Amino acid sequence: MSTPRIRTVTVPDEEMLNALQPTPEGIDVVVWDFHSDPQGARYGDVDVVVLPYMSLGDMRGPLAKIPDLKLVQTQSTGYEGVPEMVGDGVAVASAAGVHAAATAELAVGLAIASLRGIDVAVRNQNDGVWQPGRFTGLADRRVLLLGVGGIGAEIAKRLDAFEVTLTRVGSSARNDERGRVHSSDELVSLAAEHDVLIVITPLNDSTRGLVDAKVLAALPDGALVVNVARGAVVDSDALTREVISGRLKAAIDVFDPEPMPQDHPLWAAPNAIITPHNGGNTGAFEPRIIKLLRSQLQALADSREPANLVRRGHWGN
């Protein structure tokens, strides 16, 4: 399959457009916010679309207006639902790597906050209560890390400093530079031997509901579940039952559904910490996404394959 010629790329706002200047010769970058027509271009001119950082929901309608769309670029590591919004021949690229450091620091931060009782201290502060206590802590804990991709690797690196016993789980059993990776088929048996479960596996057909009632039930009493992946990787109802009962603790940045309903019982659970899908949303995001997009634009201008293709589309198999 021949390399497609790219001429016009849309970005979702003026701020990103300005940050990408100067753009490579031969590539026109214009603003398209999905609410009005592209600025300075016709729909028929557009070859590549950069999606907004947080999804606008189902964008099939706007994307269908582009008759010869060649590539959709996400600003997130996850890309679930994006291939389904465009034709089979359209390539999809993720922002893998952009959010790795930020999401890893949140995963470890949530674990520390829960295991050291920082959430308890904050609630006590609101009431003016001085109440010392001995909490579990992260050192010497047995941590089960579900996900060994880019963010999983960054989490593992950060956990090295905390003197934990780390067990890693991927889609299949294998060895890598860090040692053994267990198969997800072993989750139930492994869960029984660990104090902390950190979830960072991508959401796809094989991982949806992977952390189910059986996995959660196998965790020891008092174990902590940290989810910085996607909400649907964990059975929400099963997690809620375990946390509300007081048997497990949870520190979650994602949930299914999102946003979490205002009347959901987890909001009031004393053994739960909830952050609103903030994993990659730090000051590191903007310079890193701009660096990636600059590299992608230059590759397209040079008729080279863009990075992070999760569906190859016009760039072949």
Image (cartoon, rainbow, N blue to C red):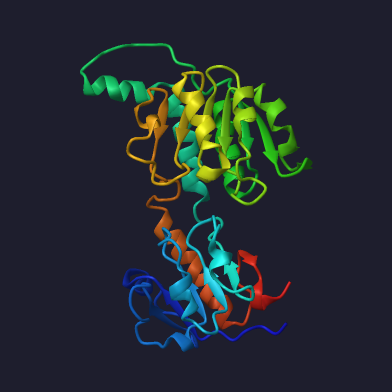
Whether residue 9 appears in this view of the structure is yes
Determine the image quadrant of residue 39.
bottom left
Residue 119 in the image: above or below residue 83: above
Q: Quadrant of the N terminus?
A: bottom right
Residue 135 in the image: above or below residue 107: above
Q: Quadrant of the C terminus?
A: bottom right
Is 4 on the left-hand or right-hand side of 227? right
Residue at 58%, 68% (x, y): give it.
92
Residue at 60%, 30% (x, y): give it.
213
What residue occupies the far right of the structure in this picture? 174
Give the x, y percent position of residue 310: 63, 63
Q: Nearer the viewer, residue 111 or 286?
A: 111
Give the x, y percent position of residue 7: 51, 86
Is 145 on the left-hand or right-hand side of 239? right
Determine the image quadrant of residue 183.
top right
Determine the image quadrant of residue 142.
top right
Whether residue 183 appears in this view of the structure is no
Residue at 36%, 32% (x, y): give it.
267
Give the x, y percent position of residue 169: 69, 37
The mark total stands at: 0
What residue occupies the far left of the structure in this picture? 128
Residue 218 in the image: above or below residue 77: above
Q: Nearer the viewer, residue 227 or 23?
A: 227
Q: Nearer the viewer, residue 169 or 299?
A: 169
Q: Nearer the viewer, residue 241 or 117?
A: 241
Give the x, y percent position of residue 117: 40, 21
